Structure formats: C-alpha cells, structure tokens
Image (cartoon, helix red, strand yellow):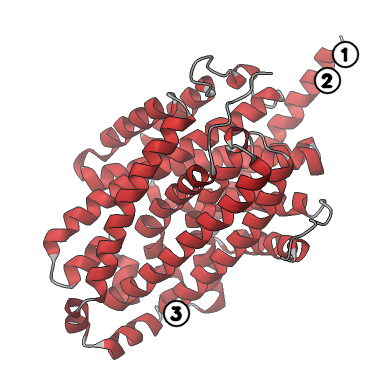
Amino acid sequence: MERLARRLGVTDAVVIGTGAMLGAGVFVVFAPAAAAAGGTGLLVALTLAGFVAFCNATSSARLAARYPESGGTYVYGRERLGPFAGFVAGWGFVIGKTASCAAMALTVGAYLWPERARLVAIIAIAAVTAVNLRGVGKTARATKVLVGVVLGVLSLVAVVGLTGFAAERIGGVGSVGGRVLSDVGGAGAPGVLTAAGLLFFAFAGYARITTLGEEVRDPRRTIPRAVPLALGMVLAIYLVLAVITLGVLGPDRLAASAAPLADVVTAVGLPGLSWVVRAGAAVAVIGVLLSLLAAVGRTLLAMGRRRDVPVGLAAVHRVHQVPYRAELAVAVVVAAVVLVGDVRGAIGFSSCTVLVYYAITNAAALTLGRDPGRRLPVRLLAVLGLAGCVTLAASLPPASVGAGIGVLAIGAAWYALHRRYLDRAGGR
C-alpha cells in the first residue's frame, strides 16, 4: 500500500487547522447564529459550540495519536467500533464537507464578483486544486500566507471597532453593553442550541489536522499539541470579534447582515475599509477551501484503500505523493454542486453530518484505555462531547436535519449493497 510522506510539524498542523476554521466562522456563520439566538444567546452559543469542539478535539487527538494515518474518524470508527460505524463517519464527512466546499467557493464569488459568483467559484476550485495537487507541503505554505493575511484583516476590524469611532456611533460604552446583551425575539434555550449547532460549523476545521495524520511528523506528539492550540487560538478570536460585532451593529442588524465585518467598519465611519475586509474575507475562505479539499481527498483515499469507495481513488501520485485521483474527483463534484448550490443551506446540512461524524469520534474514544500522564478527564470529555454532538445536531433547522439523515441513510444502503456484492464476489 502506497504511503504519504510525513512533512508537517506542529506549526504546519496548527496553521492548517487555524486556516480551516477562521474563514468559515468569522465571515459566514455569525449572522444566522445571531438570527437564531440574539445577542447574549450568540455569545452563549459560541461558548457552548467551543466547549463541544474542545471535547471532540480531545477525543480526536487521542485517536489520531493511536492511528496516525489518513482518514480521521473513518479510520477510528472502523478500528474501535466496526466497519459500518467507520463508513458512516467517512460518508458523512465526505458528503458534508463537499457541501461545505461548495458553500465556501460560492462565498468567494459573492465577495469578489457577486454578479459572476458561480464563475469565480469554479475558478477558485480549480486554483486550489492545482495547489493541493503539488503536495501537502505546498498546501501548508500557502495556508500560512493566507492565515497571515486574514489575521491582519481581523486585527484591523478589531482595532477599528474598539476605537472612539465605534463609541461615538453607538453612544458610549454602556450602549455597547446594551447591544451585546439584547436579544432578537427572546429565542431562549432552543435558539441558543440551534445557534450553537450552526456555529459548530466554524470550529470543525481542526479535523483537518487529524485527517492529515499520515503526513504529520511524530504524530503521537504533534497531533495532541496542534489540535488544542489551533482550537484555543480560534475560539479567542471568535469571542473578541463576536463582542465587537454585536457592540457596533447590535443583534438585529447583525442577524440581517450579509457581510458583518464589512458592516462594522462602515458603521464606525470608515466605509472605504469595507473593501479591505471583503478582500480579507475572500482570502480567508480560500484558505478554508484549500485545507478542506485536501481533507476530503484524504478521507476518500482511506475509504478507497478499504474498498468502501472505488479502489482507484486510493492512488497516490509518485512524485508529489498526494491522492490525486481523489482530489480531482472531489473538485469535479464540488464544481457541479456550485452550479446549483446555496451557501446558507449548505451550512446547516454540513453541521448535521459533521456532528454525526464527531459523535462517532467520541464513541470511539470511549473504547480507549486511560492515558498515562494526562491530567484531563478524557473519558468524561468524550461522554460530554458525544452528548453535545447529538443535542446540537437535533437542534438544527428541521430541513438540515432531514437532509443530513437522508443522505446518511443513502450511504448506509450503499454500504450494505456494496458489501454484499464484495462478499459474494469473494466467495466465488
């Protein structure tokens, strides 16, 4: 079996995970989450989503250190819970993240050229795929550049939002607090849970570190360090920007905004900077797309090795050592979805399938023994992560839950028929 080269260190893995999270959360998810939960509800939901992500990250890191190969929870589920659980995880990840890739590509188009959003999205997919096909080292270096640009733009928004411009526009510090603490329609606990489920979409990027496990140097040391580092950095950034955005715009305007961070700089009297923010948003989302396409390709590689998808998808390029057929197949499917897709609908669908993926992650982690030297209550965190994933998935909009369950059921039916065929063929 052809293996991928181990080229990524701790910094590379943290950058890839951070790049995968920043674009999705800051530029896409805050508005629908605010619409579901209101002001205080948004902050509570963000904290809840971050905690569930931390539980999942702990379980993922333990499993990735034990099974340092491409595929993430597809591999962990197979090894710890059985082939069917692994397939459900892999299928959910591939389908959900394919929808995410399409949503991210469409977001790039909407920011850069709204009148030709689908055309720009197709070009972005082609460019990102070309980078990924050159090897994971190119992916990591490109992601470092993109993350640096995004952090610069987000820092600009934070500084502008905290200046006297913002205070003058919203009537002082007390008014900031009032806007942050106000609610839209008194959403209550159901709205908070729905918002947390949507916001979880923004944290799922750390999975890119574990799905690249076969390409990480010293995975038993690197992965457990990289996952919480990336997650902690992003959670801190989200909380700061959520408070600033709510303080400047208020929950009502935030809920209706198509570009919240661009609206922040406009609201404080600097509309000329909105184009800088829009360009930063496009860069951020391209960073997400870069690592996301790579991760889906690696999951298909793992599934192809075990004949859960056509075995040809497991081919590894001799020179660049990437799963080139899998990555090309993903790019083609994402491009097709872009032609008919919708950004906001994809977020709920992706959240549902990915929460199922992480529920299997936590269930698999519960089968592991104790970790010597670990101070964290890892088994308790796995239980809380499993319960959190199930609760947040069930709290998503009904259309998202229905679509997610339907696609998972189709995958389960395919698995049963395909396995029956393989068993019969093997018995001849």
| Residue drawn at (27%, 74%) of the image | 249
Residue receiving disc 1? 427
- Could you tell me if the residues under marks 2 and 1 are in contact, i.e. CB atoms within 8 Å? yes
| Residue drawn at (49%, 29%) of the image | 330
**Horizontal and vertical percent position of residue 162:** 26, 75
- Image quadrant assignment for residue 256: bottom left
**Above or below, comparing residue 414 to residue 195 in the picture:** above
**Secondary structure type for disc 3:** helix
Q: Quadrant of the C terminus?
A: top right
- Few, some or many C-alpha atoms within 10 Å of disc 2 (few <14, some 14-19, many ≥20)? few
Residue receiving disc 3? 40
Q: Amino acid at mark 3?
A: Thr
Please, which residue is most extreme toward the right here? 427
- Of the numbered discs 2 and 3, the one sitting upstream in the chain is 3
**Above or below, comparing residue 222 to residue 248 in the picture:** above
Is 378 positioned to the left or the right of 273 in the image?
Answer: right
Is 285 positioned to the left or the right of 420 in the image?
Answer: left
- Image quadrant assignment for residue 378: bottom right
Q: Nearer the viewer, residue 306 or 236?
A: 236
Please, which residue is most extreme toward the top here? 428
Residue receiving disc 2? 423
Give the Cα distance between marks 2 and 1: 6 Å
Residue 267 visible (yes or no): yes
Give the Cα distance between marks 1 and 3: 61 Å
**Horizontal and vertical percent position of residue 242:** 38, 70
| Residue drawn at (37%, 56%) of the image | 28
Give the Cα distance between marks 2 and 3: 55 Å
Q: Nearer the viewer, residue 346 or 131?
A: 131
